Amino acid sequence: MSTAGPGPDAGHHLRHLRERMAEHHRRARAEHEESALEEAIDGAAFDLAADIAHPTAAGGTEPGYDVDTDLGVDRR
């Protein structure tokens, strides 16, 4: 067993390790945020499909979601 202290490159190796760990955490956070965004988009598409599939509260034959009205487009 060596009684010598850390070598001159120990500081460099620790800095390199910290940089690699920081980069790993940045990538993991970005992947998590991207995954959460994809789930939100999937949920929004499901909500829109559910709105389109359900009739209005008045019970009419028109769908519950009107794209033209929602987007403020005049029907002419």
Image (spheres, helix red, strand yellow):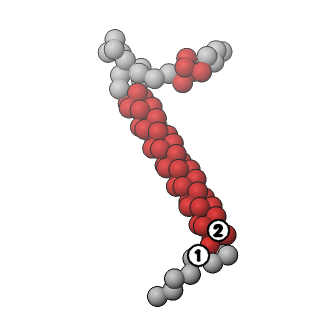
**Do we see residue 60 in this rendering?**
yes
Q: Crowding at label 2, few (<14), some or many (≥20) Cα neighbours within 10 Å?
A: few
Q: Nearer the viewer, residue 34 or 2?
A: 2
Q: Nearer the viewer, residue 42 or 12?
A: 12
Is 34 positioned to the left or the right of 39 in the image?
A: right
Is 65 positioned to the left or the right of 60 in the image?
A: right
Quadrant in the rendering for residue 7: bottom right
| Residue 5 percent coordinates (x, y) | 57, 76
Quadrant in the rendering for residue 27: bottom right
Q: Residue at x 58, y 57 (%)?
A: 22
Q: Residue at x 58, y 53 (%)?
A: 26
Q: Residue at x 47, y 39 (%)?
A: 40
Question: Label 1, label 2: how many angstroms apart (C-alpha)?
Answer: 9 Å
Q: Secondary structure at mark 1?
A: loop
Q: Nearer the viewer, residue 23 or 57?
A: 23
Of badges 1 and 2, nearer the viewer stands: 1
Task: Please name the residue that numbered disc 2 is placed on.
Answer: 11
Q: Residue furthest front?
A: 3
Question: Are discs 1 and 2 less than 8 Å apart at CB?
Answer: yes
**Do we see residue 75 in this rendering?**
no
Quadrant in the rendering for residue 72: top right
Name the N-terminal-most of marks 1 and 2: 1
